[in-house]
Amino acid sequence: MGFRYQLATPDGELLDEAVDLDVEPKAGDVIEVAGLGKARVVSVVPIRGTDAVADETMHGVLEVEPV
């Protein structure tokens, strides 16, 4: 089972991309994001909800910045 996260900027702007990861990320991790390239995780905001478009469980919001 993977972990699905919505992406946002540190300013709170939600990005169109969501990312599926094999491991739970933590602040400081660098992840690869389609359309953005490499991004550093600034913070992780855990949530439990359903992505209405993909009908999948959303694990949280990742605040990311380009590397």
Image: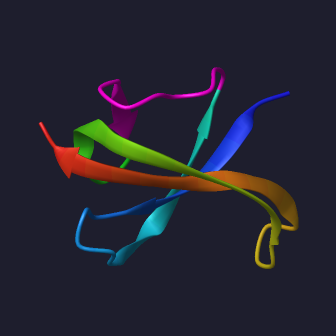
Query: Does the magenta-highlighted stretch encompass residue 23?
Result: yes
Above or below, comparing residue 37 to residue 12 in the picture: above
| Horizontal and vertical percent position of residue 33 | 37, 42
Say which of 65 and 56 sits in front.
65
Which of the 4 image quarters holds residue 6?
bottom right
What is the span of residues highlighted in magenta in the rendered image? 22-33
Q: Is 31 situated left or right of 49 in this image? A: left
Quadrant including the C terminus: top left
Q: Could you say which is closer to the camera, residue 41 or residue 54?
A: 41
Residue 30 position within the rendered picture, expressed as x and y whole percent measured from the top left? 30, 26
Q: Where residue 51 sits in the image (x, y, percent)? A: 77, 70
**Image height of 39 relative to 58, above or below:** above
Q: Residue at 44% of width from left, 59% of height from top?
A: 7
As for residue 51 lying within the magenta part, the answer is no
In the shown orientation, is residue 56 left or right of residue 22?
right
Q: Position of residue 46 (x, y in %)?
A: 65, 51
Q: Determine which quarter of the picture holds residue 41.
A: top left
Magenta stretch mostly in which secondary structure?
Answer: loop
Type of colouring: rainbow
User: In the figure, is residue 4 to the left or right of 25?
Assistant: right
Residue 14 left/right relative to 61: left
Q: Residue at x 63, y 20 (%)?
A: 23
Q: Residue at x 82, y 66 (%)?
A: 49
Residue visible at 36% across and 32% down in the picture: 32
- Label total for image: 0
- The quarter in which the N terminus is drawn is top right
> Looking at this rendering, what residue extends furthest in the left direction?
67
